[in-house]
Amino acid sequence: MSELIKKQVTDAKALMDKAIAHADSELTKIRAGKANPAMLDDITIDYYGTATPLSQVGSVNTPDARTIVVQPWEKNLLPLIEKAIKEANLGVNPQNDGIIIRINVPPLTEERRRDLVKKAKAEAETGKVAVRNIRKDANEKIKKLKTEGVSEDEIKVGEAEVQKLTDAYIIKVDQLSEAKEKDIMTV
């Protein structure tokens, strides 16, 4: 296989790694009935005029399986954090005791579990689409190498390598999705 094709395959692999990492992080954000600090990753508060992630203005911990505790580094941020959590529409109700914010994560109903499984499958499908788009782009780049003197056979070998990578990464996305589904449906 020519160096040009090897480079395209390597680039495609790196992009697919990023797509898998992104799909994994999106699946992690879907709550499975257990308290997880990642549930609050997308929440930002107005910290002196700047939208700042919650994790940068306080510590976020899970003392037990059903509770998340947010302890801000400045007490005057408590009402802002409480408001941001409520507005994030996570289905939780933050309790402000003047020192920390405690979030009790309620157990999921069967209907809510099914909704979360649908959401997890949608995220997994988004990950698969990203991997397929990377395959398409890599194959187009490999086909363009014909103008640089790369033979038909080498182009076919390169496309086959990219397809092997695609198949492997689609399986990885499926495994992440199945694990998340099992996690959600476990009572």
Image (cartoon, rainbow, N blue to C red):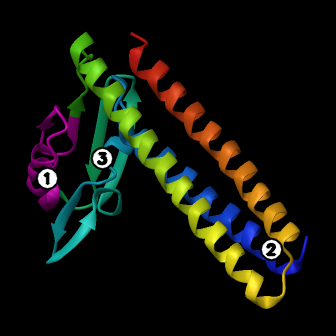
Residue 25, x across and y down, in percent: 46, 48
Does 129 sit left or right of 163 as displayed?
left
Question: The residue tagged with tag 3: helix, strand or loop?
Answer: helix
Q: Which residue is mark 1?
A: 84
Q: Nearer the viewer, residue 147 or 34?
A: 147
Mark positioned earlier in the residue sequence (3 or 1): 3
Q: Which residues are magenta?
A: 76-102
Evaluate if marks 3 and 1 touch, with contact meaning CB atoms under 8 Å apart: no
Is residue 98 rendered magenta in the image? yes
Does 100 sit left or right of 6 as displayed?
left
Evaluate if marks 2 and 1 touch, with contact meaning CB atoms under 8 Å apart: no
Q: Which residue is mark 3?
A: 40
Question: The residue tagged with tag 2: helix, strand or loop?
Answer: helix
Q: Which residue is mark 2?
A: 5
Q: Nearer the viewer, residue 102 or 29?
A: 29
Mark positioned earlier in the residue sequence (2 or 1): 2
Query: What amino acid is labelled 3 in the image?
Result: Leu
